Amino acid sequence: MSVEHVAFVVAAVACISGAVVASTHRDPRTSGAGLFVMLLSLAVLYATLAAPVLAGGALLVTFFLTVPLVVHAAPHEPDAGGADAPAAGRIALGAAAVVLAMLAGAIRVGEIPRNVSLRSADGYDLAGLASRVTGPSAVAVGTAVLLLVAVAFAARAARRASR
Amino acid sequence: MTTGAYLYVGAVLFAAGALGTVLRPTVWGRLVSTEVMLAAATLTFAAAGTGFRELDGQIAALVVVVIGLAQAAVGYVQVGQRR
């Protein structure tokens, strides 16, 4: 088992465990801690995918958003629980099973390429990414930047309004 | 590693987030669950982009990260106002 495999298995297990805790735990602090673990392990998964920009983005979200959110905004009381939770949970699990079956079918048929290892990625193409960002994907990236600016202004306005 | 392994992790993450979205009645619970679903979408984009040797997947993933940031900022304000 290579280092890459070990990193993937550890990060995947941590990521799934964190996501399950974040989504299902009723205590807001524990749920926030699960989200924190999930985002950190997600950064490791991006790194194993040879996507350091995304790994950096995940770390930025973790430290500049998740931690403040958990520390300042998490409500103190646990959830009361949904009225029709079991039925909704069964529907969600059924939909998840269908999606997993479709994914397994696509992989078996060969619709999805087999390898994403660091060795087969031929390094990280930063120049290629920059040319995409300034070329064909310029509108999408520009919109994302505008969205970031709008979020910053909205957060500032909300903070002023709450004073 | 195989592309499928990453896609399976993304699918399980998305299912966990979807489950939390329908199970938890509070704004906080749904906010966190939606973050989990967006993270799953990002991982799927990144894995598919790397698997197909296309950088478009990473750019799409970056856009989803920004959308997740915006959504979390709105949720931050909402949860803060309800306290």
Image (tube, coloured by chain):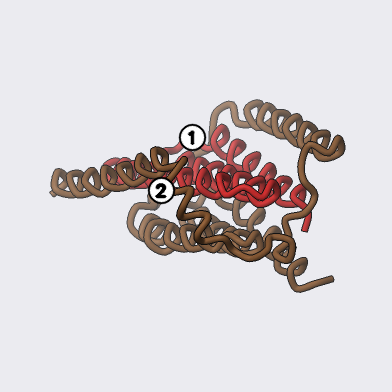
**SS state under label 2:** helix
For the C terminus of chain B, give its image quadrant.
top left
Question: Left or right: A103 with respect to B67?
Answer: right
Residue type, numbered disc 2: Thr
**SS state under label 1:** loop
Residue name at image x 61 percent, y 37 percent: B19
Residue type, numbered disc 1: Pro
Question: Left or right: A40 with respect to A119?
Answer: left
Circle 1 or circle 2, nearest the eye = 2
- Residue named by callout 1: B25
Shown in red, the chain is B
Marker disc for residue A52: none
Cα distance in 3D space between marks 1 and 2: 42 Å
For the N terminus of chain B, give its image quadrant.
bottom right
- Residue named by callout 2: A134
Task: Identify the colour of chain A in the image.
Answer: brown
